[in-house]
């Protein structure tokens, strides 16, 4: 495997999922983690989707992120065909606004887990994927630590702003 090979595979059920899944691509990019992105419906092209899942490990992929809306079976079906960790992102789509996708993604039978993030949680899916890769990559763990420090700074800034508002409103 070469350094430039993608280690995260992002699958999505439709091109209509792309906007929602771009947060994952962006976040992985910020950590310098290469990914491959594919539209692959397990309902409309099941053979292709299952082939992709079963070949992912031997291609050097280490984590698979699957985003889908409605009857969102992509992550579960992919998890059935690989020993790689699979992260599911339920997406908002149609009348049930993502609740259907959440249930379909998270309610997996024993033995076939899908690590399910929030509805529309593509960013968190990427962070979780980086955390998995960082188990064996100290440099990535360093970047995650820096990311966590930034989160703390952001909270401190929010507190400063809240205190300022309270003072301006004569409430402190
Ligand atoms: C799901 O149905 C897809 O993941 C998408 O969220 C939703 C609608 O798909 P399209 O009809 O836009 O292709 O399978």
Image (cartoon, rainbow, N blue to C red):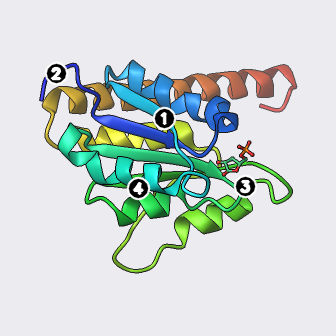
Q: Crowding at label 3, few (<14), some or many (≥20) Cα neighbours within 10 Å?
A: many
Read off the residue under disc 1.
38
Q: CA distance from mark 1 to mark 3?
A: 21 Å
Q: Nearer the viewer, mark 1 or mark 2?
A: 1
Q: Which numbered disc, 1 or 3, marks the residue that appears first in the sequence? A: 1
What is the C-alpha distance between the residues marked 3 and 4? 24 Å
Residue at 78 percent across and 24 percent down: it is 165
Position of 74 compared to 137: left or right? right
Q: Nearer the viewer, mark 3 or mark 4?
A: 4
**Sequence-wise, which precedes: disc 3 or disc 2?**
2
Q: Which residue is mark 2?
A: 3
Secondary structure of residue under mark 2: loop
State the residue position of label 3.
98
Residue 161 in percent (x, y) is at 69, 22
Whole-percent x, y for residue 159 in the image: 62, 29
At mark 3, the secondary structure is loop
Horizontal and vertical percent for residue 97?
79, 54
Q: Earlier in the sequence, mark 2 or mark 4?
A: 2
Q: Which quadrant of the figure has residue 121?
A: top right
| 4 or 1: mark nearer the eye | 4
Q: Earlier in the sequence, mark 3 or mark 4?
A: 4
Residue 60's image quarter?
top left
Q: Nearer the viewer, residue 57 or 120?
A: 57
Residue at figure coordinates x 29%, y 28% from the top left: 6
Mark 4 vs ligand 1: CB under 8 Å? no
Residue at x 48% of width, y 35% of height: 38
Mark 1, secondary structure of its residue: strand
- Asked if 84 appears above or below 22 in the picture, the reply is below
Mark whose residue sits in front, 3 or 2: 2
């Amino acid at each position: 495997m070469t350094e430039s090979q993608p280690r995260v595979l992002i699958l999505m059920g439709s091109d209509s999922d792309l906007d929602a899944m771009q947060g994952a691509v962006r976040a992985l990019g910020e950590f310098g983690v290469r990914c491959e992105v594919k539209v692959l419906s397990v309902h409309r092209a099941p053979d292709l989707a299952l082939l992709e899942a079963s070949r992912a490990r031997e291609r050097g992929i280490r984590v698979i992120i699957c985003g889908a809306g409605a009857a969102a079976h992509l992550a579960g079906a992919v998890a059935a065909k690989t020993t790689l960790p699979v992260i599911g992102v339920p997406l908002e789509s149609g009348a049930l606004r993502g609740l259907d996708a959440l249930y379909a993604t998270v309610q997996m039978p024993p033995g076939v887990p899908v690590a399910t993030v929030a509805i529309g949680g593509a960013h968190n899916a990427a962070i979780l994927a980086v955390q998995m890769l960082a188990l064996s990559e100290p440099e990535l763990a360093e970047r995650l630590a820096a990311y966590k420090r930034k989160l703390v700074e952001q909270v401190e800034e929010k507190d400063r702003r809240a205190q300022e508002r309270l003072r301006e409103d004569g409430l402190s």
